[in-house]
Image (cartoon, rainbow, N blue to C red):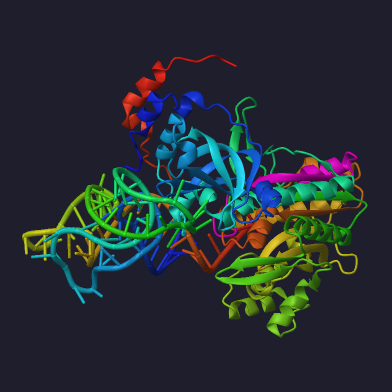
RNA sequence: GGGCCCGUAGCUCAGCCCGGUAGAGCGGCGGGCUUUUAACCCGUAGGUCCCGGGUUCGAAUCCCGGCGGGCCCGCCA
């Protein structure tokens, strides 16, 4: 079931209009957006002699007998096409097509630009080509696809029908482009670091493991590009970045997916303050350019709220934010005292590091209440093995995280460039791993990375910006899977046309080619 | 890994508590209509009630097991 099989195909074949045989290309001269801006000023009922050529998918067909309205959608929006009997009559091709074209089909239309009595810019068709047939019914109605299972299984339908999802995918591209422009203007070089790595690092997460047959070696899919980008800083690329796919073999939920995209940037001779400035500029300027304003309306859960990216963003010390929420002093409190506070909040912490307890309390109490972009700064030393010690107090590191709408969006710091301390912190991480085993993520020892910075890494600042999460927040989408074009779904038993209708296979194998071009 | 919820027509969902011929709207198909916007009017077809087992005279409905999905918690961004 599911096929909208009409005898239509054989009618098309008889008329020599089978799109699989005849439709190889179509000259599009204008898209919806342009058409509307160029001809929006026409008066209702006004007809021009301007001939245009448009193409797209038919979403709605309104047949009134002598006149038919088609809503065509291209990548930029809707174009109304009018088929009028007085024009169609006598043209056997148009007569047949105006009868056979259905919702879902993809067509090309040549005609004159007119504005209807009701004021809609439209194309009055003079010629129509059927470019592709929709054999399966597409649910074009107000609710689109709702069943989450089907949304992800047939994501092309979800992207087609759900404008929020479609816009998120398009706008993420635009944001990436704007960020690239800004970085390019500042002299940053974009690179690709390895996705197959002999030692994973740059974050604390379980990696995917695979084998390179040619080398007979176990390798890990990159969990972060960080250590490689910093090797490049050592190599003299003093401003580098990557829009990197990262793989982390952890559980999936509304804000986590095993593959995701981060922009990581490193700048020599810069520190965490410079990186906060860079982060502010990248995020707020790209959003301004894509959405037209620093303030973006976000519709989520039925209500519309405004996200304000205007600089400068609020900055708050990690421990201050906790004290504010808790109304208790926590600075200088021991691990045991913090554990007690965590316990009173019903937060269980297995990790032995004091900083981890602080982080857990922070995530529970503070993060959900952050709305506008906020930098949280000054993190504990013991949970940041790659960050540089705070110049004002060695118990902290010069690290910041960016939160927007209750989500962690970015993480950056003054990079640790001291190879001796780097070795020591990796050692501590190794100890932690042995102590706790698989329960706690720890950074593995990476002596090649240490060797690299032993050659001398300048003082450097770095930041990673989670692009999917940024898009979730700006697009008002509740799940990270909504902004990822395709996600993994369970296997299905799918019936396809060819196995249902062998006669179609026989027909297409027997089609004689026409003249080549 | 733990808890809660969901799976019925192409889509959105009702029916399930309290067992008794499987329903609605939209969409599809056929017909009508020359200015519609989710067009309208008339007619009509369409089902492995996720899968397997059990209870029962009888199961979409109750019970058990499985599969798929969502949300929350734990862990990671």
Q: How many marks?
A: 0
Residue A227 in the image, given as x and y percentages of width and height:
77, 45
Q: Is residue A434 magenta?
A: no
Q: Is residue A250 magenta?
A: yes
Q: Nearer the viewer, residue A314 or A147?
A: A147
- Residue at (83%, 58%) from the top-left corner? A281
Specify whether residue A444 is in view: no
What span is colored magenta in the figure?
A: A227-255
With respect to residue B23, does A170 lie above or below? above
Name the image quarter holding the N terminus of chain A.
top left
Q: Seen in the image, is A469 located left or right of residue A293?
A: left
In this orientation, does residue A269 appear?
yes
Q: In the rendering, at what x and y percent does residue A282 appear?
A: 80, 56
Image side of residue A148 versus residue A370, left or right: left
Q: Residue at x 89, y 48 (%)?
A: A186
**Residue A335 placed where, x, y %?**
70, 73
- Of residues A202 and A468, the one nearer the viewer is A468
Residue at horizontal 66 percent and vertical 73 percent from the top:
A361
> In the rendered view, does A362 fall on the left or right side of A59?
right
For residue A120, which quarter of the picture? bottom right
Quadrant for the C terminus of chain A in the image:
top right
Residue A136, picture quadrant: top left
Residue A59 x, y percent position in the rendering: 49, 48
Front in this rendered view, residue A476 or A419: A476
Measuring 63% from the left and 24% from the top, which residue is drawn there? A214
Name which quarter of the figure residue A362 lies in.
bottom right
In this rendering, position of residue A351 left or right of residue A241: left
């Amino acid at each position: 079931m599911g096929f909208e099989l009409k005898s239509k195909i054989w009618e098309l074949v008889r008329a020599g209009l089978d799109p699989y045989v005849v439709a190889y290309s179509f000259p599009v001269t204008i898209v919806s957006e342009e058409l509307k801006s160029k001809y929006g000023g026409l008066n209702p009922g006004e007809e021009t002699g301007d001939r245009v050529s448009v193409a797209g998918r038919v979403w709605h067909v309104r047949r009134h007998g002598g006149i038919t309205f088609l809503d065509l959608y291209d990548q930029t929006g809707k174009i109304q096409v009018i088929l009028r009997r007085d024009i169609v009559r006598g043209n056997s091709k148009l007569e047949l097509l105006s009868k056979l074209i259905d919702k879902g089909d993809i067509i090309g239309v040549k005609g004159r630009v007119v504005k209807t009595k009701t004021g809609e810019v439209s194309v009055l068709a003079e010629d129509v080509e059927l470019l592709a047939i929709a054999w399966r019914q597409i649910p074009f109605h107000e609710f689109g696809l709702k069943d989450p299972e089907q949304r992800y299984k047939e994501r092309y339908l979800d992207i087609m029908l759900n404008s929020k999802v479609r816009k998120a995918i398009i706008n993420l591209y635009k944001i990436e482009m704007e960020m690239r422009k800004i970085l390019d203007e500042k002299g940053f070089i974009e690179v690709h670091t390895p996705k197959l790595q002999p030692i994973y690092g740059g974050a604390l997460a379980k990696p995917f493991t695979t084998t390179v047959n040619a080398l007979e070696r176990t390798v890990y899919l990159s969990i972060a590009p960080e250590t490689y980008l910093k090797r490049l800083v050592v190599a003299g690329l003093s401003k580098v970045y990557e829009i990197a796919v990262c793989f982390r073999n952890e559980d999936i939920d509304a804000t986590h997916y095993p593959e995701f995209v981060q922009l990581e940037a490193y700048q020599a001779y810069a520190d965490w303050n410079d990186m906060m400035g860079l982060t502010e500029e990248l995020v707020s300027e790209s959003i301004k350019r894509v959405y037209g304003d620093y303030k973006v309306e976000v519709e989520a859960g039925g209500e519309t709220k405004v996200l304000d990216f205007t600089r400068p963003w609020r900055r708050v010390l990690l421990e201050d934010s906790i004290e504010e929420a808790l109304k208790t002093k926590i600075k200088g409190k021991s691990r045991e005292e913090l554990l007690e506070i965590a316990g009173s909040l019903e937060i269980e912490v297995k990790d032995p590091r004091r900083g981890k307890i602080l982080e857990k309390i922070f995530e529970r109490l503070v993060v959900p209440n952050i709305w506008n972009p906020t930098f949280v700064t000054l993190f504990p030393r013991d949970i940041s093995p790659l960050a540089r010690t705070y110049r004002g107090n060695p118990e902290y590191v010069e690290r910041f995280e960016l939160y927007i709408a209750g989500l962690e969006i970015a993480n950056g710091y003054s990079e640790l460039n001291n190879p001796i301390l780097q070795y020591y912190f990796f050692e501590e991480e190794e100890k932690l791993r042995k102590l706790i085993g698989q329960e706690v993520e720890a950074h593995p020892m990476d002596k090649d990375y240490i060797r690299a910075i032993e050659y001398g890494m300048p003082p450097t600042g770095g930041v990673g910006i989670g692009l999917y999460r940024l898009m979730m927040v700006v697009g008002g989408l509740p799940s990270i899977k909504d902004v990822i074009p395709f996600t993994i779904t369970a296997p299905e038993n799918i019936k396809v046309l060819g196995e249902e209708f062998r006669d179609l296979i026989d027909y297409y194998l027997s089609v004689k080619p026409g003249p080549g071009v």
